[in-house]
C-alpha cells in the first residue's frame, strides 16, 4: 500500500476556531498556526455557552467538562427588570439532545484547545501543531496556496484555513472585497466577570435569582419598556466566576462603542442604563474598577466559505450576534467537519472535492444559525430563543449530517 505524505496545513489565527481545527487536522497532517498576538495574550471576552451541539463537538476533540471547568446548565430563567420571575425552563439537555449544555470561561476553552492542538503524542493523536506567535499574515493567494507574512516571507500550503476572526483578511481572498463587511447590529454589550466569593461579600448572600440549589440556570433580566435592554448572567469556571453581559441599544448610548473586546466602557453610564434593574446588580456594578463595552456586529451569509486552497471558519466565515449563544459552537462544528480530511490515502488531489463537500455541509447550517441569531436579537425574549434552539442543538457532527443528506 502506497504511503501518502501528510498535507501541509496552514491555519491563520490561533483563537478558538483555529486551535480546534488544528486539533482535528494534527491527527493526520502537518499543521502550522500563525497567530498575530504574543503567546501570553489573554483571550478577550468572558464566558461562552456550549450548547449540546457544541459539547458534542468538544467531546469529539477529547475535551471534558473537567478540562474546561465547565458548569452544567439546567436551563433558562427569565426575569423582568425588577427581578420578578417571568418564566423558568428546566431542560435535561443530555436526555433531549444527547449532550449537556456547558457554561465555560473563554480562556479555559482556549487553554484546553491549545493543549489539544499542541500536546505531546503520548496524550493526543498525531503530530503536535506548531504555533507561530507574533506572526501577521498580510496576503493570501487561494489559487496557488500561498500566504505572505509580515516579514515578506512566503509560505506554501496544500490547505489554508482562515480563522482570523470578524476582521478577517482571508475573507476577501475568498469572496472578494465587494461582499459587504460585518456592520453594527445596533446593540452594544457591557461585559464583566466577578468572582462568586466577591458577590457574596458585596451582598451578604447570593441573590435568589442566581442561587443554584435546585439547578444552575442562565438568568436573563429583560426590560419591559421595549428598549431591548437586558442583562444575562451565568456562572463558569467551576462556579467560581459569574459572567455578566448587559445589553443596551446603540441609539441610547452616549459613549461611542466599537467592535473591540478591549474597549473600556463608562461605568457610570452603564449604571444609569440599568437603574431600574435589581439593586443588587447596581451594587455589583459599582464595585467594578473597569468594564468592557463591545459593539455587536452582524453580517449577511457568505456565498461560499471556500476558494482554491482556502476555507473560512468561525467569525471569519459567519460572524453572528450572540442571542443564540452559537458563535463558539459553530466554530467547533466547523473544525470537527475537517474530519473529512482524515480519510485514508488522502492526497492534495482530493482537496477540491473535499472542500466542496465541506462547504456544502457547513455553509447552509451556519448561515441559518446566523439568520436565527439576528431574529433573536431583534426582540430578546425566551420564546424567540427557545423556538430556534432545537435547530441549533440537534447536530451530531459532519458524518451524521452527510448520512442524513444521502437519505
Image (cartoon, grey):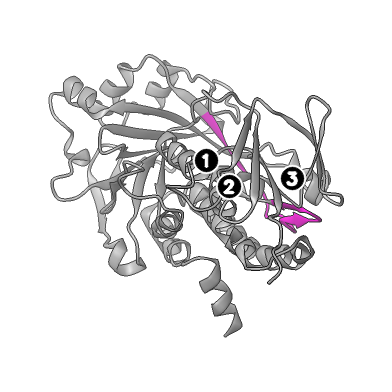
* 353 relative to 207 in the view: left or right: right
User: What residue is shown with label 1?
Assistant: 118
Disc 3 versus disc 1: nearer the observer: 1
Query: Label 2 to label 3, Cα distance in Å?
Result: 19 Å
Q: Percent x, y for residue 98?
A: 35, 67
Instruction: Check whether the beta carbons of the residues at disc 2 and disc 3 lie within 8 A of each other.
Output: no
Q: Nearer the viewer, residue 278 or 167?
A: 167
Q: Percent x, y for residue 74?
A: 25, 54
Residue drawn at the location 24% of the way across and 26% of the way down: 279
Compared with residue 276, is residue 32 higher up or lower down, i.e. above or below?
below
Instruction: Check whether the beta carbons of the residues at disc 1 and disc 2 lie within 8 A of each other.
Output: yes
User: What residue is shown with label 3?
Assistant: 171
Q: Percent x, y for residue 220?
A: 33, 44
At mark 1, the secondary structure is: helix
* 55 relative to 44 in the view: left or right: left
At mark 2, the secondary structure is: helix
At mark 3, the secondary structure is: helix
Region in magenta: 294-311
Give the mark nearer the N terminus: 2 vs 3: 2
Q: What's the mark number on residue 22? A: 2
Residue drawn at the location 48% of the way across and 20% of the way down: 265
Compared with residue 151, is residue 232 higher up or lower down, i.e. above or below?
below
Amino acid at each position: 500500500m502506497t504511503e501518502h505524505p501528510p498535507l501541509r496545513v496552514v491555519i491563520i489565527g490561533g483563537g478558538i476556531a483555529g486551535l480546534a481545527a488544528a486539533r482535528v487536522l494534527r491527527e493526520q497532517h502537518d499543521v502550522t498556526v500563525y497567530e498575530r498576538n504574543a503567546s501570553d495574550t489573554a483571550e478577550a471576552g468572558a464566558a461562552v455557552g456550549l450548547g449540546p451541539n457544541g459539547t458534542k463537538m468538544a467531546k469529539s476533540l477529547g475535551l471534558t467538562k473537567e478540562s474546561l471547568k465547565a458548569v452544567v446548565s439546567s436551563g433558562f430563567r427569565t426575569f423582568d427588570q425588577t427581578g420578578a420571575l417571568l418564566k423558568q425552563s428546566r431542560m435535561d439537555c443530555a436526555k433531549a439532545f444527547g449532550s449537556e449544555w456547558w457554561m465555560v470561561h473563554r480562556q479555559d476553552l482556549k487553554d484546553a484547545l491549545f493543549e489539544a492542538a499542541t500536546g505531546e503524542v503520548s496524550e493526543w493523536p498525531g503530530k503536535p501543531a506548531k504555533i507561530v506567535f507574533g506572526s501577521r499574515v498580510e496576503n493570501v493567494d487561494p489559487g496557488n496556496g500561498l500566504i505572505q507574512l509580515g516579514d515578506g516571507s512566503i509560505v506554501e500550503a496544500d490547505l489554508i484555513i482562515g480563522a482570523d476572526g470578524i476582521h478577517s483578511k482571508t475573507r476577501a481572498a475568498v469572496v472578494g472585497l465587494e461582499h459587504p463587511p460585518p456592520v453594527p447590529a445596533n446593540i452594544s454589550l457591557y461585559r464583566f466577570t466577578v468572582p462568586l466569593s466577591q458577590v457574596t461579600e458585596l451582598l451578604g448572600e447570593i441573590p435568589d435569582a442566581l442561587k443554584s440549589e435546585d439547578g444552575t440556570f442562565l438568568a436573563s433580566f429583560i426590560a419591559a419598556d421595549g428598549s431591548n435592554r437586558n442583562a444575562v448572567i451565568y456562572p463558569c469556571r467551576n462556579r467560581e466566576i459569574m459572567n455578566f453581559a448587559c445589553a443596551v441599544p446603540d441609539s441610547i448610548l452616549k459613549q461611542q462603542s466599537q467592535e473591540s473586546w478591549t474597549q473600556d466602557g463608562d461605568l457610570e453610564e452603564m449604571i444609569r442604563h440599568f437603574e431600574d434593574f435589581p439593586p443588587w446588580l447596581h451594587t455589583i456594578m459599582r464595585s467594578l474598577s473597569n468594564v468592557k463595552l463591545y459593539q455587536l456586529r452582524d453580517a449577511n451569509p457568505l456565498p461560499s466559505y471556500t476558494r482554491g486552497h482556502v476555507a473560512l471558519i468561525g467569525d471569519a466565515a459567519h460572524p453572528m450576534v450572540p442571542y443564540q449563544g452559537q458563535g463558539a459552537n459553530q466554530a467547533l462544528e466547523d473544525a470537527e467537519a475537517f474530519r473529512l480530511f482524515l480519510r485514508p490515502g488522502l492526497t492534495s488531489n482530493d482537496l477540491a472535492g473535499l472542500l466542496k463537500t465541506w462547504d456544502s455541509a457547513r455553509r447552509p447550517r451556519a448561515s441559518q444559525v446566523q439568520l436565527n441569531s439576528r431574529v433573536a436579537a431583534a426582540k430578546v425574549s425566551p420564546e424567540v430563543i427557545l423556538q430556534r434552539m432545537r435547530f441549533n442543538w440537534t447536530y451530531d457532527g459532519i458524518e451524521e449530517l452527510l448520512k442524513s443528506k444521502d437519505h
